[in-house]
Image (spheres, helix red, strand yellow):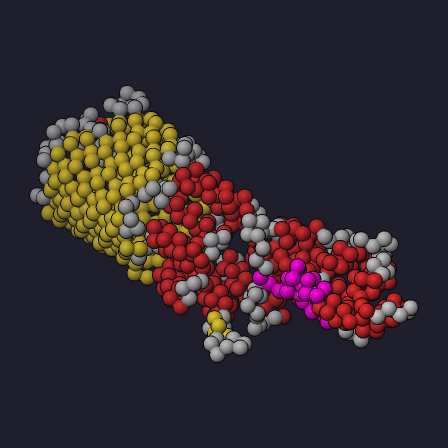
Amino acid sequence: MYPVPPRQRDRSAPATTGRGAGCAALATLAFALGGASLHASPANARDELLSRARSQHEAGHRLEALAACEDLLLRWPADADAQRLRIALLAELGAAGRALELAQQLSTPLPAAELARLQADAAAHQARWAQALPADTRHPYVEADRALSVRGESPADDAIAAADRMIALARASRSAEAVDAYRTLSRRGGALPAYADAPVADALLQQRQPEQAIPLYEAAAQAHSGPYSEDEADPRIGLAHAYLEAGRHRQARQWIDGVAAREPAWLPSPGSLRPRANPHKTEADLAAALVRQETWLYREAWQRLHTLRAEGPANAPVWNQLADVERARGWPRRAENTLMGAAGLDPDDTSIRLGAIEGWRDLNDFPRVEPAMRELEAVVPREPQVQVARQAWDRQRGWQFDLEHDRGRGGSPNFGDADHETQATLQSPLLDDRWRLYGITRLAFANLPEGHAQRERLGVGLRGYARGLEAYVQLLPAVGGATRRTAVEAGLRWLPDDHWTYALDWSNTGDADVPLRAHYYGIAAHALDASAQWRASELSAIKLSANADRYSDGNRRYGWEAAWTQRAYTAAWFTVDGGLRAGATRNSRSDVPYYSPSCARWAALTGRLENLLYQRYERSWSHQLELSFGSYDECRYGSGWMASAHYGQRWAPRGGLAFGWGIGWNSQPYDGKRDNRVMLDLTVHWGE
């Protein structure tokens, strides 16, 4: 947390170490210092004690003055002069809360200005307590709310009072109010005191205004460049986050790497020969890893965090962030185990519990999500991270809509001179955290040499979820006279661990495998498709798929394909993947009106480039380029080259809404004749 001096009017007042403990210590010490005079009882004892208290106060000996006041008040409890002097001394010694409490009990109230100053001082001290870990983790806002409640009306031009209020608002997770107060102060021409720059910058960052937060963080880091005490927050860390969230990732990386390099790993430990770990060094290293994680440098971030955990295995934030990177690399179960270790070190950490919730969402372990979310919201409902997680979860469990449209042009008898396929799906919200009902429409069209062919279906489906498992069954009756039979389709996807994924799909009409040319002649197929993928991480994967189709005209088609992808290059928000794809197919009949080679083989080199052009929280814009080049060999027709290219973009204007478009081209021989096609694809997704 950032240091917040109580008030900058009296720098000679020492800081207290705890509200209850500080007041008790002052009272005990004052009693000890003044106890010797209790037995003296001359006629002028009251005047002597008051005079002693005032002289000690004027000499700067506040504890001795307080002792004399306590001695006097033990014998004359209603003495107004001693009461007022005690209040002033307590305020100067840092016991602002107790001073305000005693002032409010006076039979003759203090002047309004003095009472307002005491209220401001008490609120400032309360804001300081709000920065520390709460005494009761189930009620984290108590101290900050109390700081706001004890403050009286302050003059409009009192920048220090306004700053203290902003700090209290920020600590109470009322960042919107803190930002409004800061803007009001700025409009009036006021300036923040130096100690308030970083807390107000925190509030601006919570309100997703990093450009406004950056100057305040920079001012805080310049005003107090370190070293920082162990319980003091480092504004340089906040500055790195602000750079990153403003899209200045290169500057964020250079800045935080420099901070981490300058921080010593160990600090001297008074009274011991063994040094102690520097928490600010760990914080800087964590921030450096986070910058890499947020810019797609997952492996580098993971390696750094692994090293940090080995050096400090009892550091809960290191475990927590390591789990976050593991989840980003596609290891949700491994991340879950890491989070269990983090929770053992700090069971009340909000970000750890949010990480567990995100992992359950990735694994379709939905029944655990809502109870955990409600438990968090009962404790920290104002926390921005919790609010964002709630919004994401509500989108995921709510309505889902997907639209895919593909359109092609060529001149081949296999696809016609124009063809398109469109599929739209509307899914219901989660039912009992395990089921979704959905409606689906599927339309396909092609202009063939023989005439117009179309396949239209409209149906319903049921999708079920369990941990690591997703299954569906759907019925799609034919629509219109050109489509025959009701399609019955089912499938599942199973992730038994963090590396293997198995998928199985079956259809009694084979719409995904049967070309429209076969459909034109009334031919359908029972189709079974299976695949297994092993994925090491985001860097490499191997996938093997196979299909078996039983056409209604007696043809039997069997095929397989293997694909290997490997990350070739990674930079900030930029990746290049290479790979190899190979496969074969065989048909029992080739005397059919659709393309059905007795055997064919192919192999191709593949490449994919992806680049994030823009990101602002949930809003993003990216583009991708995919290339493929290889050889296609068909029995009786020999071999020929084949190639494809596709360029696409994806725009997400807000969380839960995304649009995609792409244009592609491919060239491949069919029965010895080359077919060239140009394709356009469009996608829309609404939900999560």
Residue 382 in the image: state x and y as whole percent: 57, 47
Quadrant in the rendering for residue 688: top left
Residue 232 in the image: state x and y as whole percent: 58, 66
462 to 274, vertically: above or below: above
Q: Which residues are magenta?
A: 1-28
Quadrant in the rendering for residue 597: top left
552 to 350, vertically: above or below: above
Dominant SS type (magenta): loop
Name the residue at the bottom extreme. 273
Q: In the figure, is residue 287 to the left or right of 306? A: right
What's the residue at 53%, 77% (across, down)?
A: 271
Q: What is the tally of numbered marks visible in this picture?
A: 0
Q: In the figure, is residue 35 to the left or right of 618? A: right
Q: 683 or 35: which is nearer to us?
A: 35
Q: 397 or 69: which is nearer to us?
A: 69
Quick check: can you spot residue 486? yes
Quadrant in the rendering for residue 193: bottom right
Residue 450 in the image: state x and y as whole percent: 21, 28
Q: 144 or 572: which is nearer to us?
A: 144
What's the residue at 87%, 67% (across, down)?
A: 46
Q: In the figure, is residue 121 to the left or right of 140? A: right
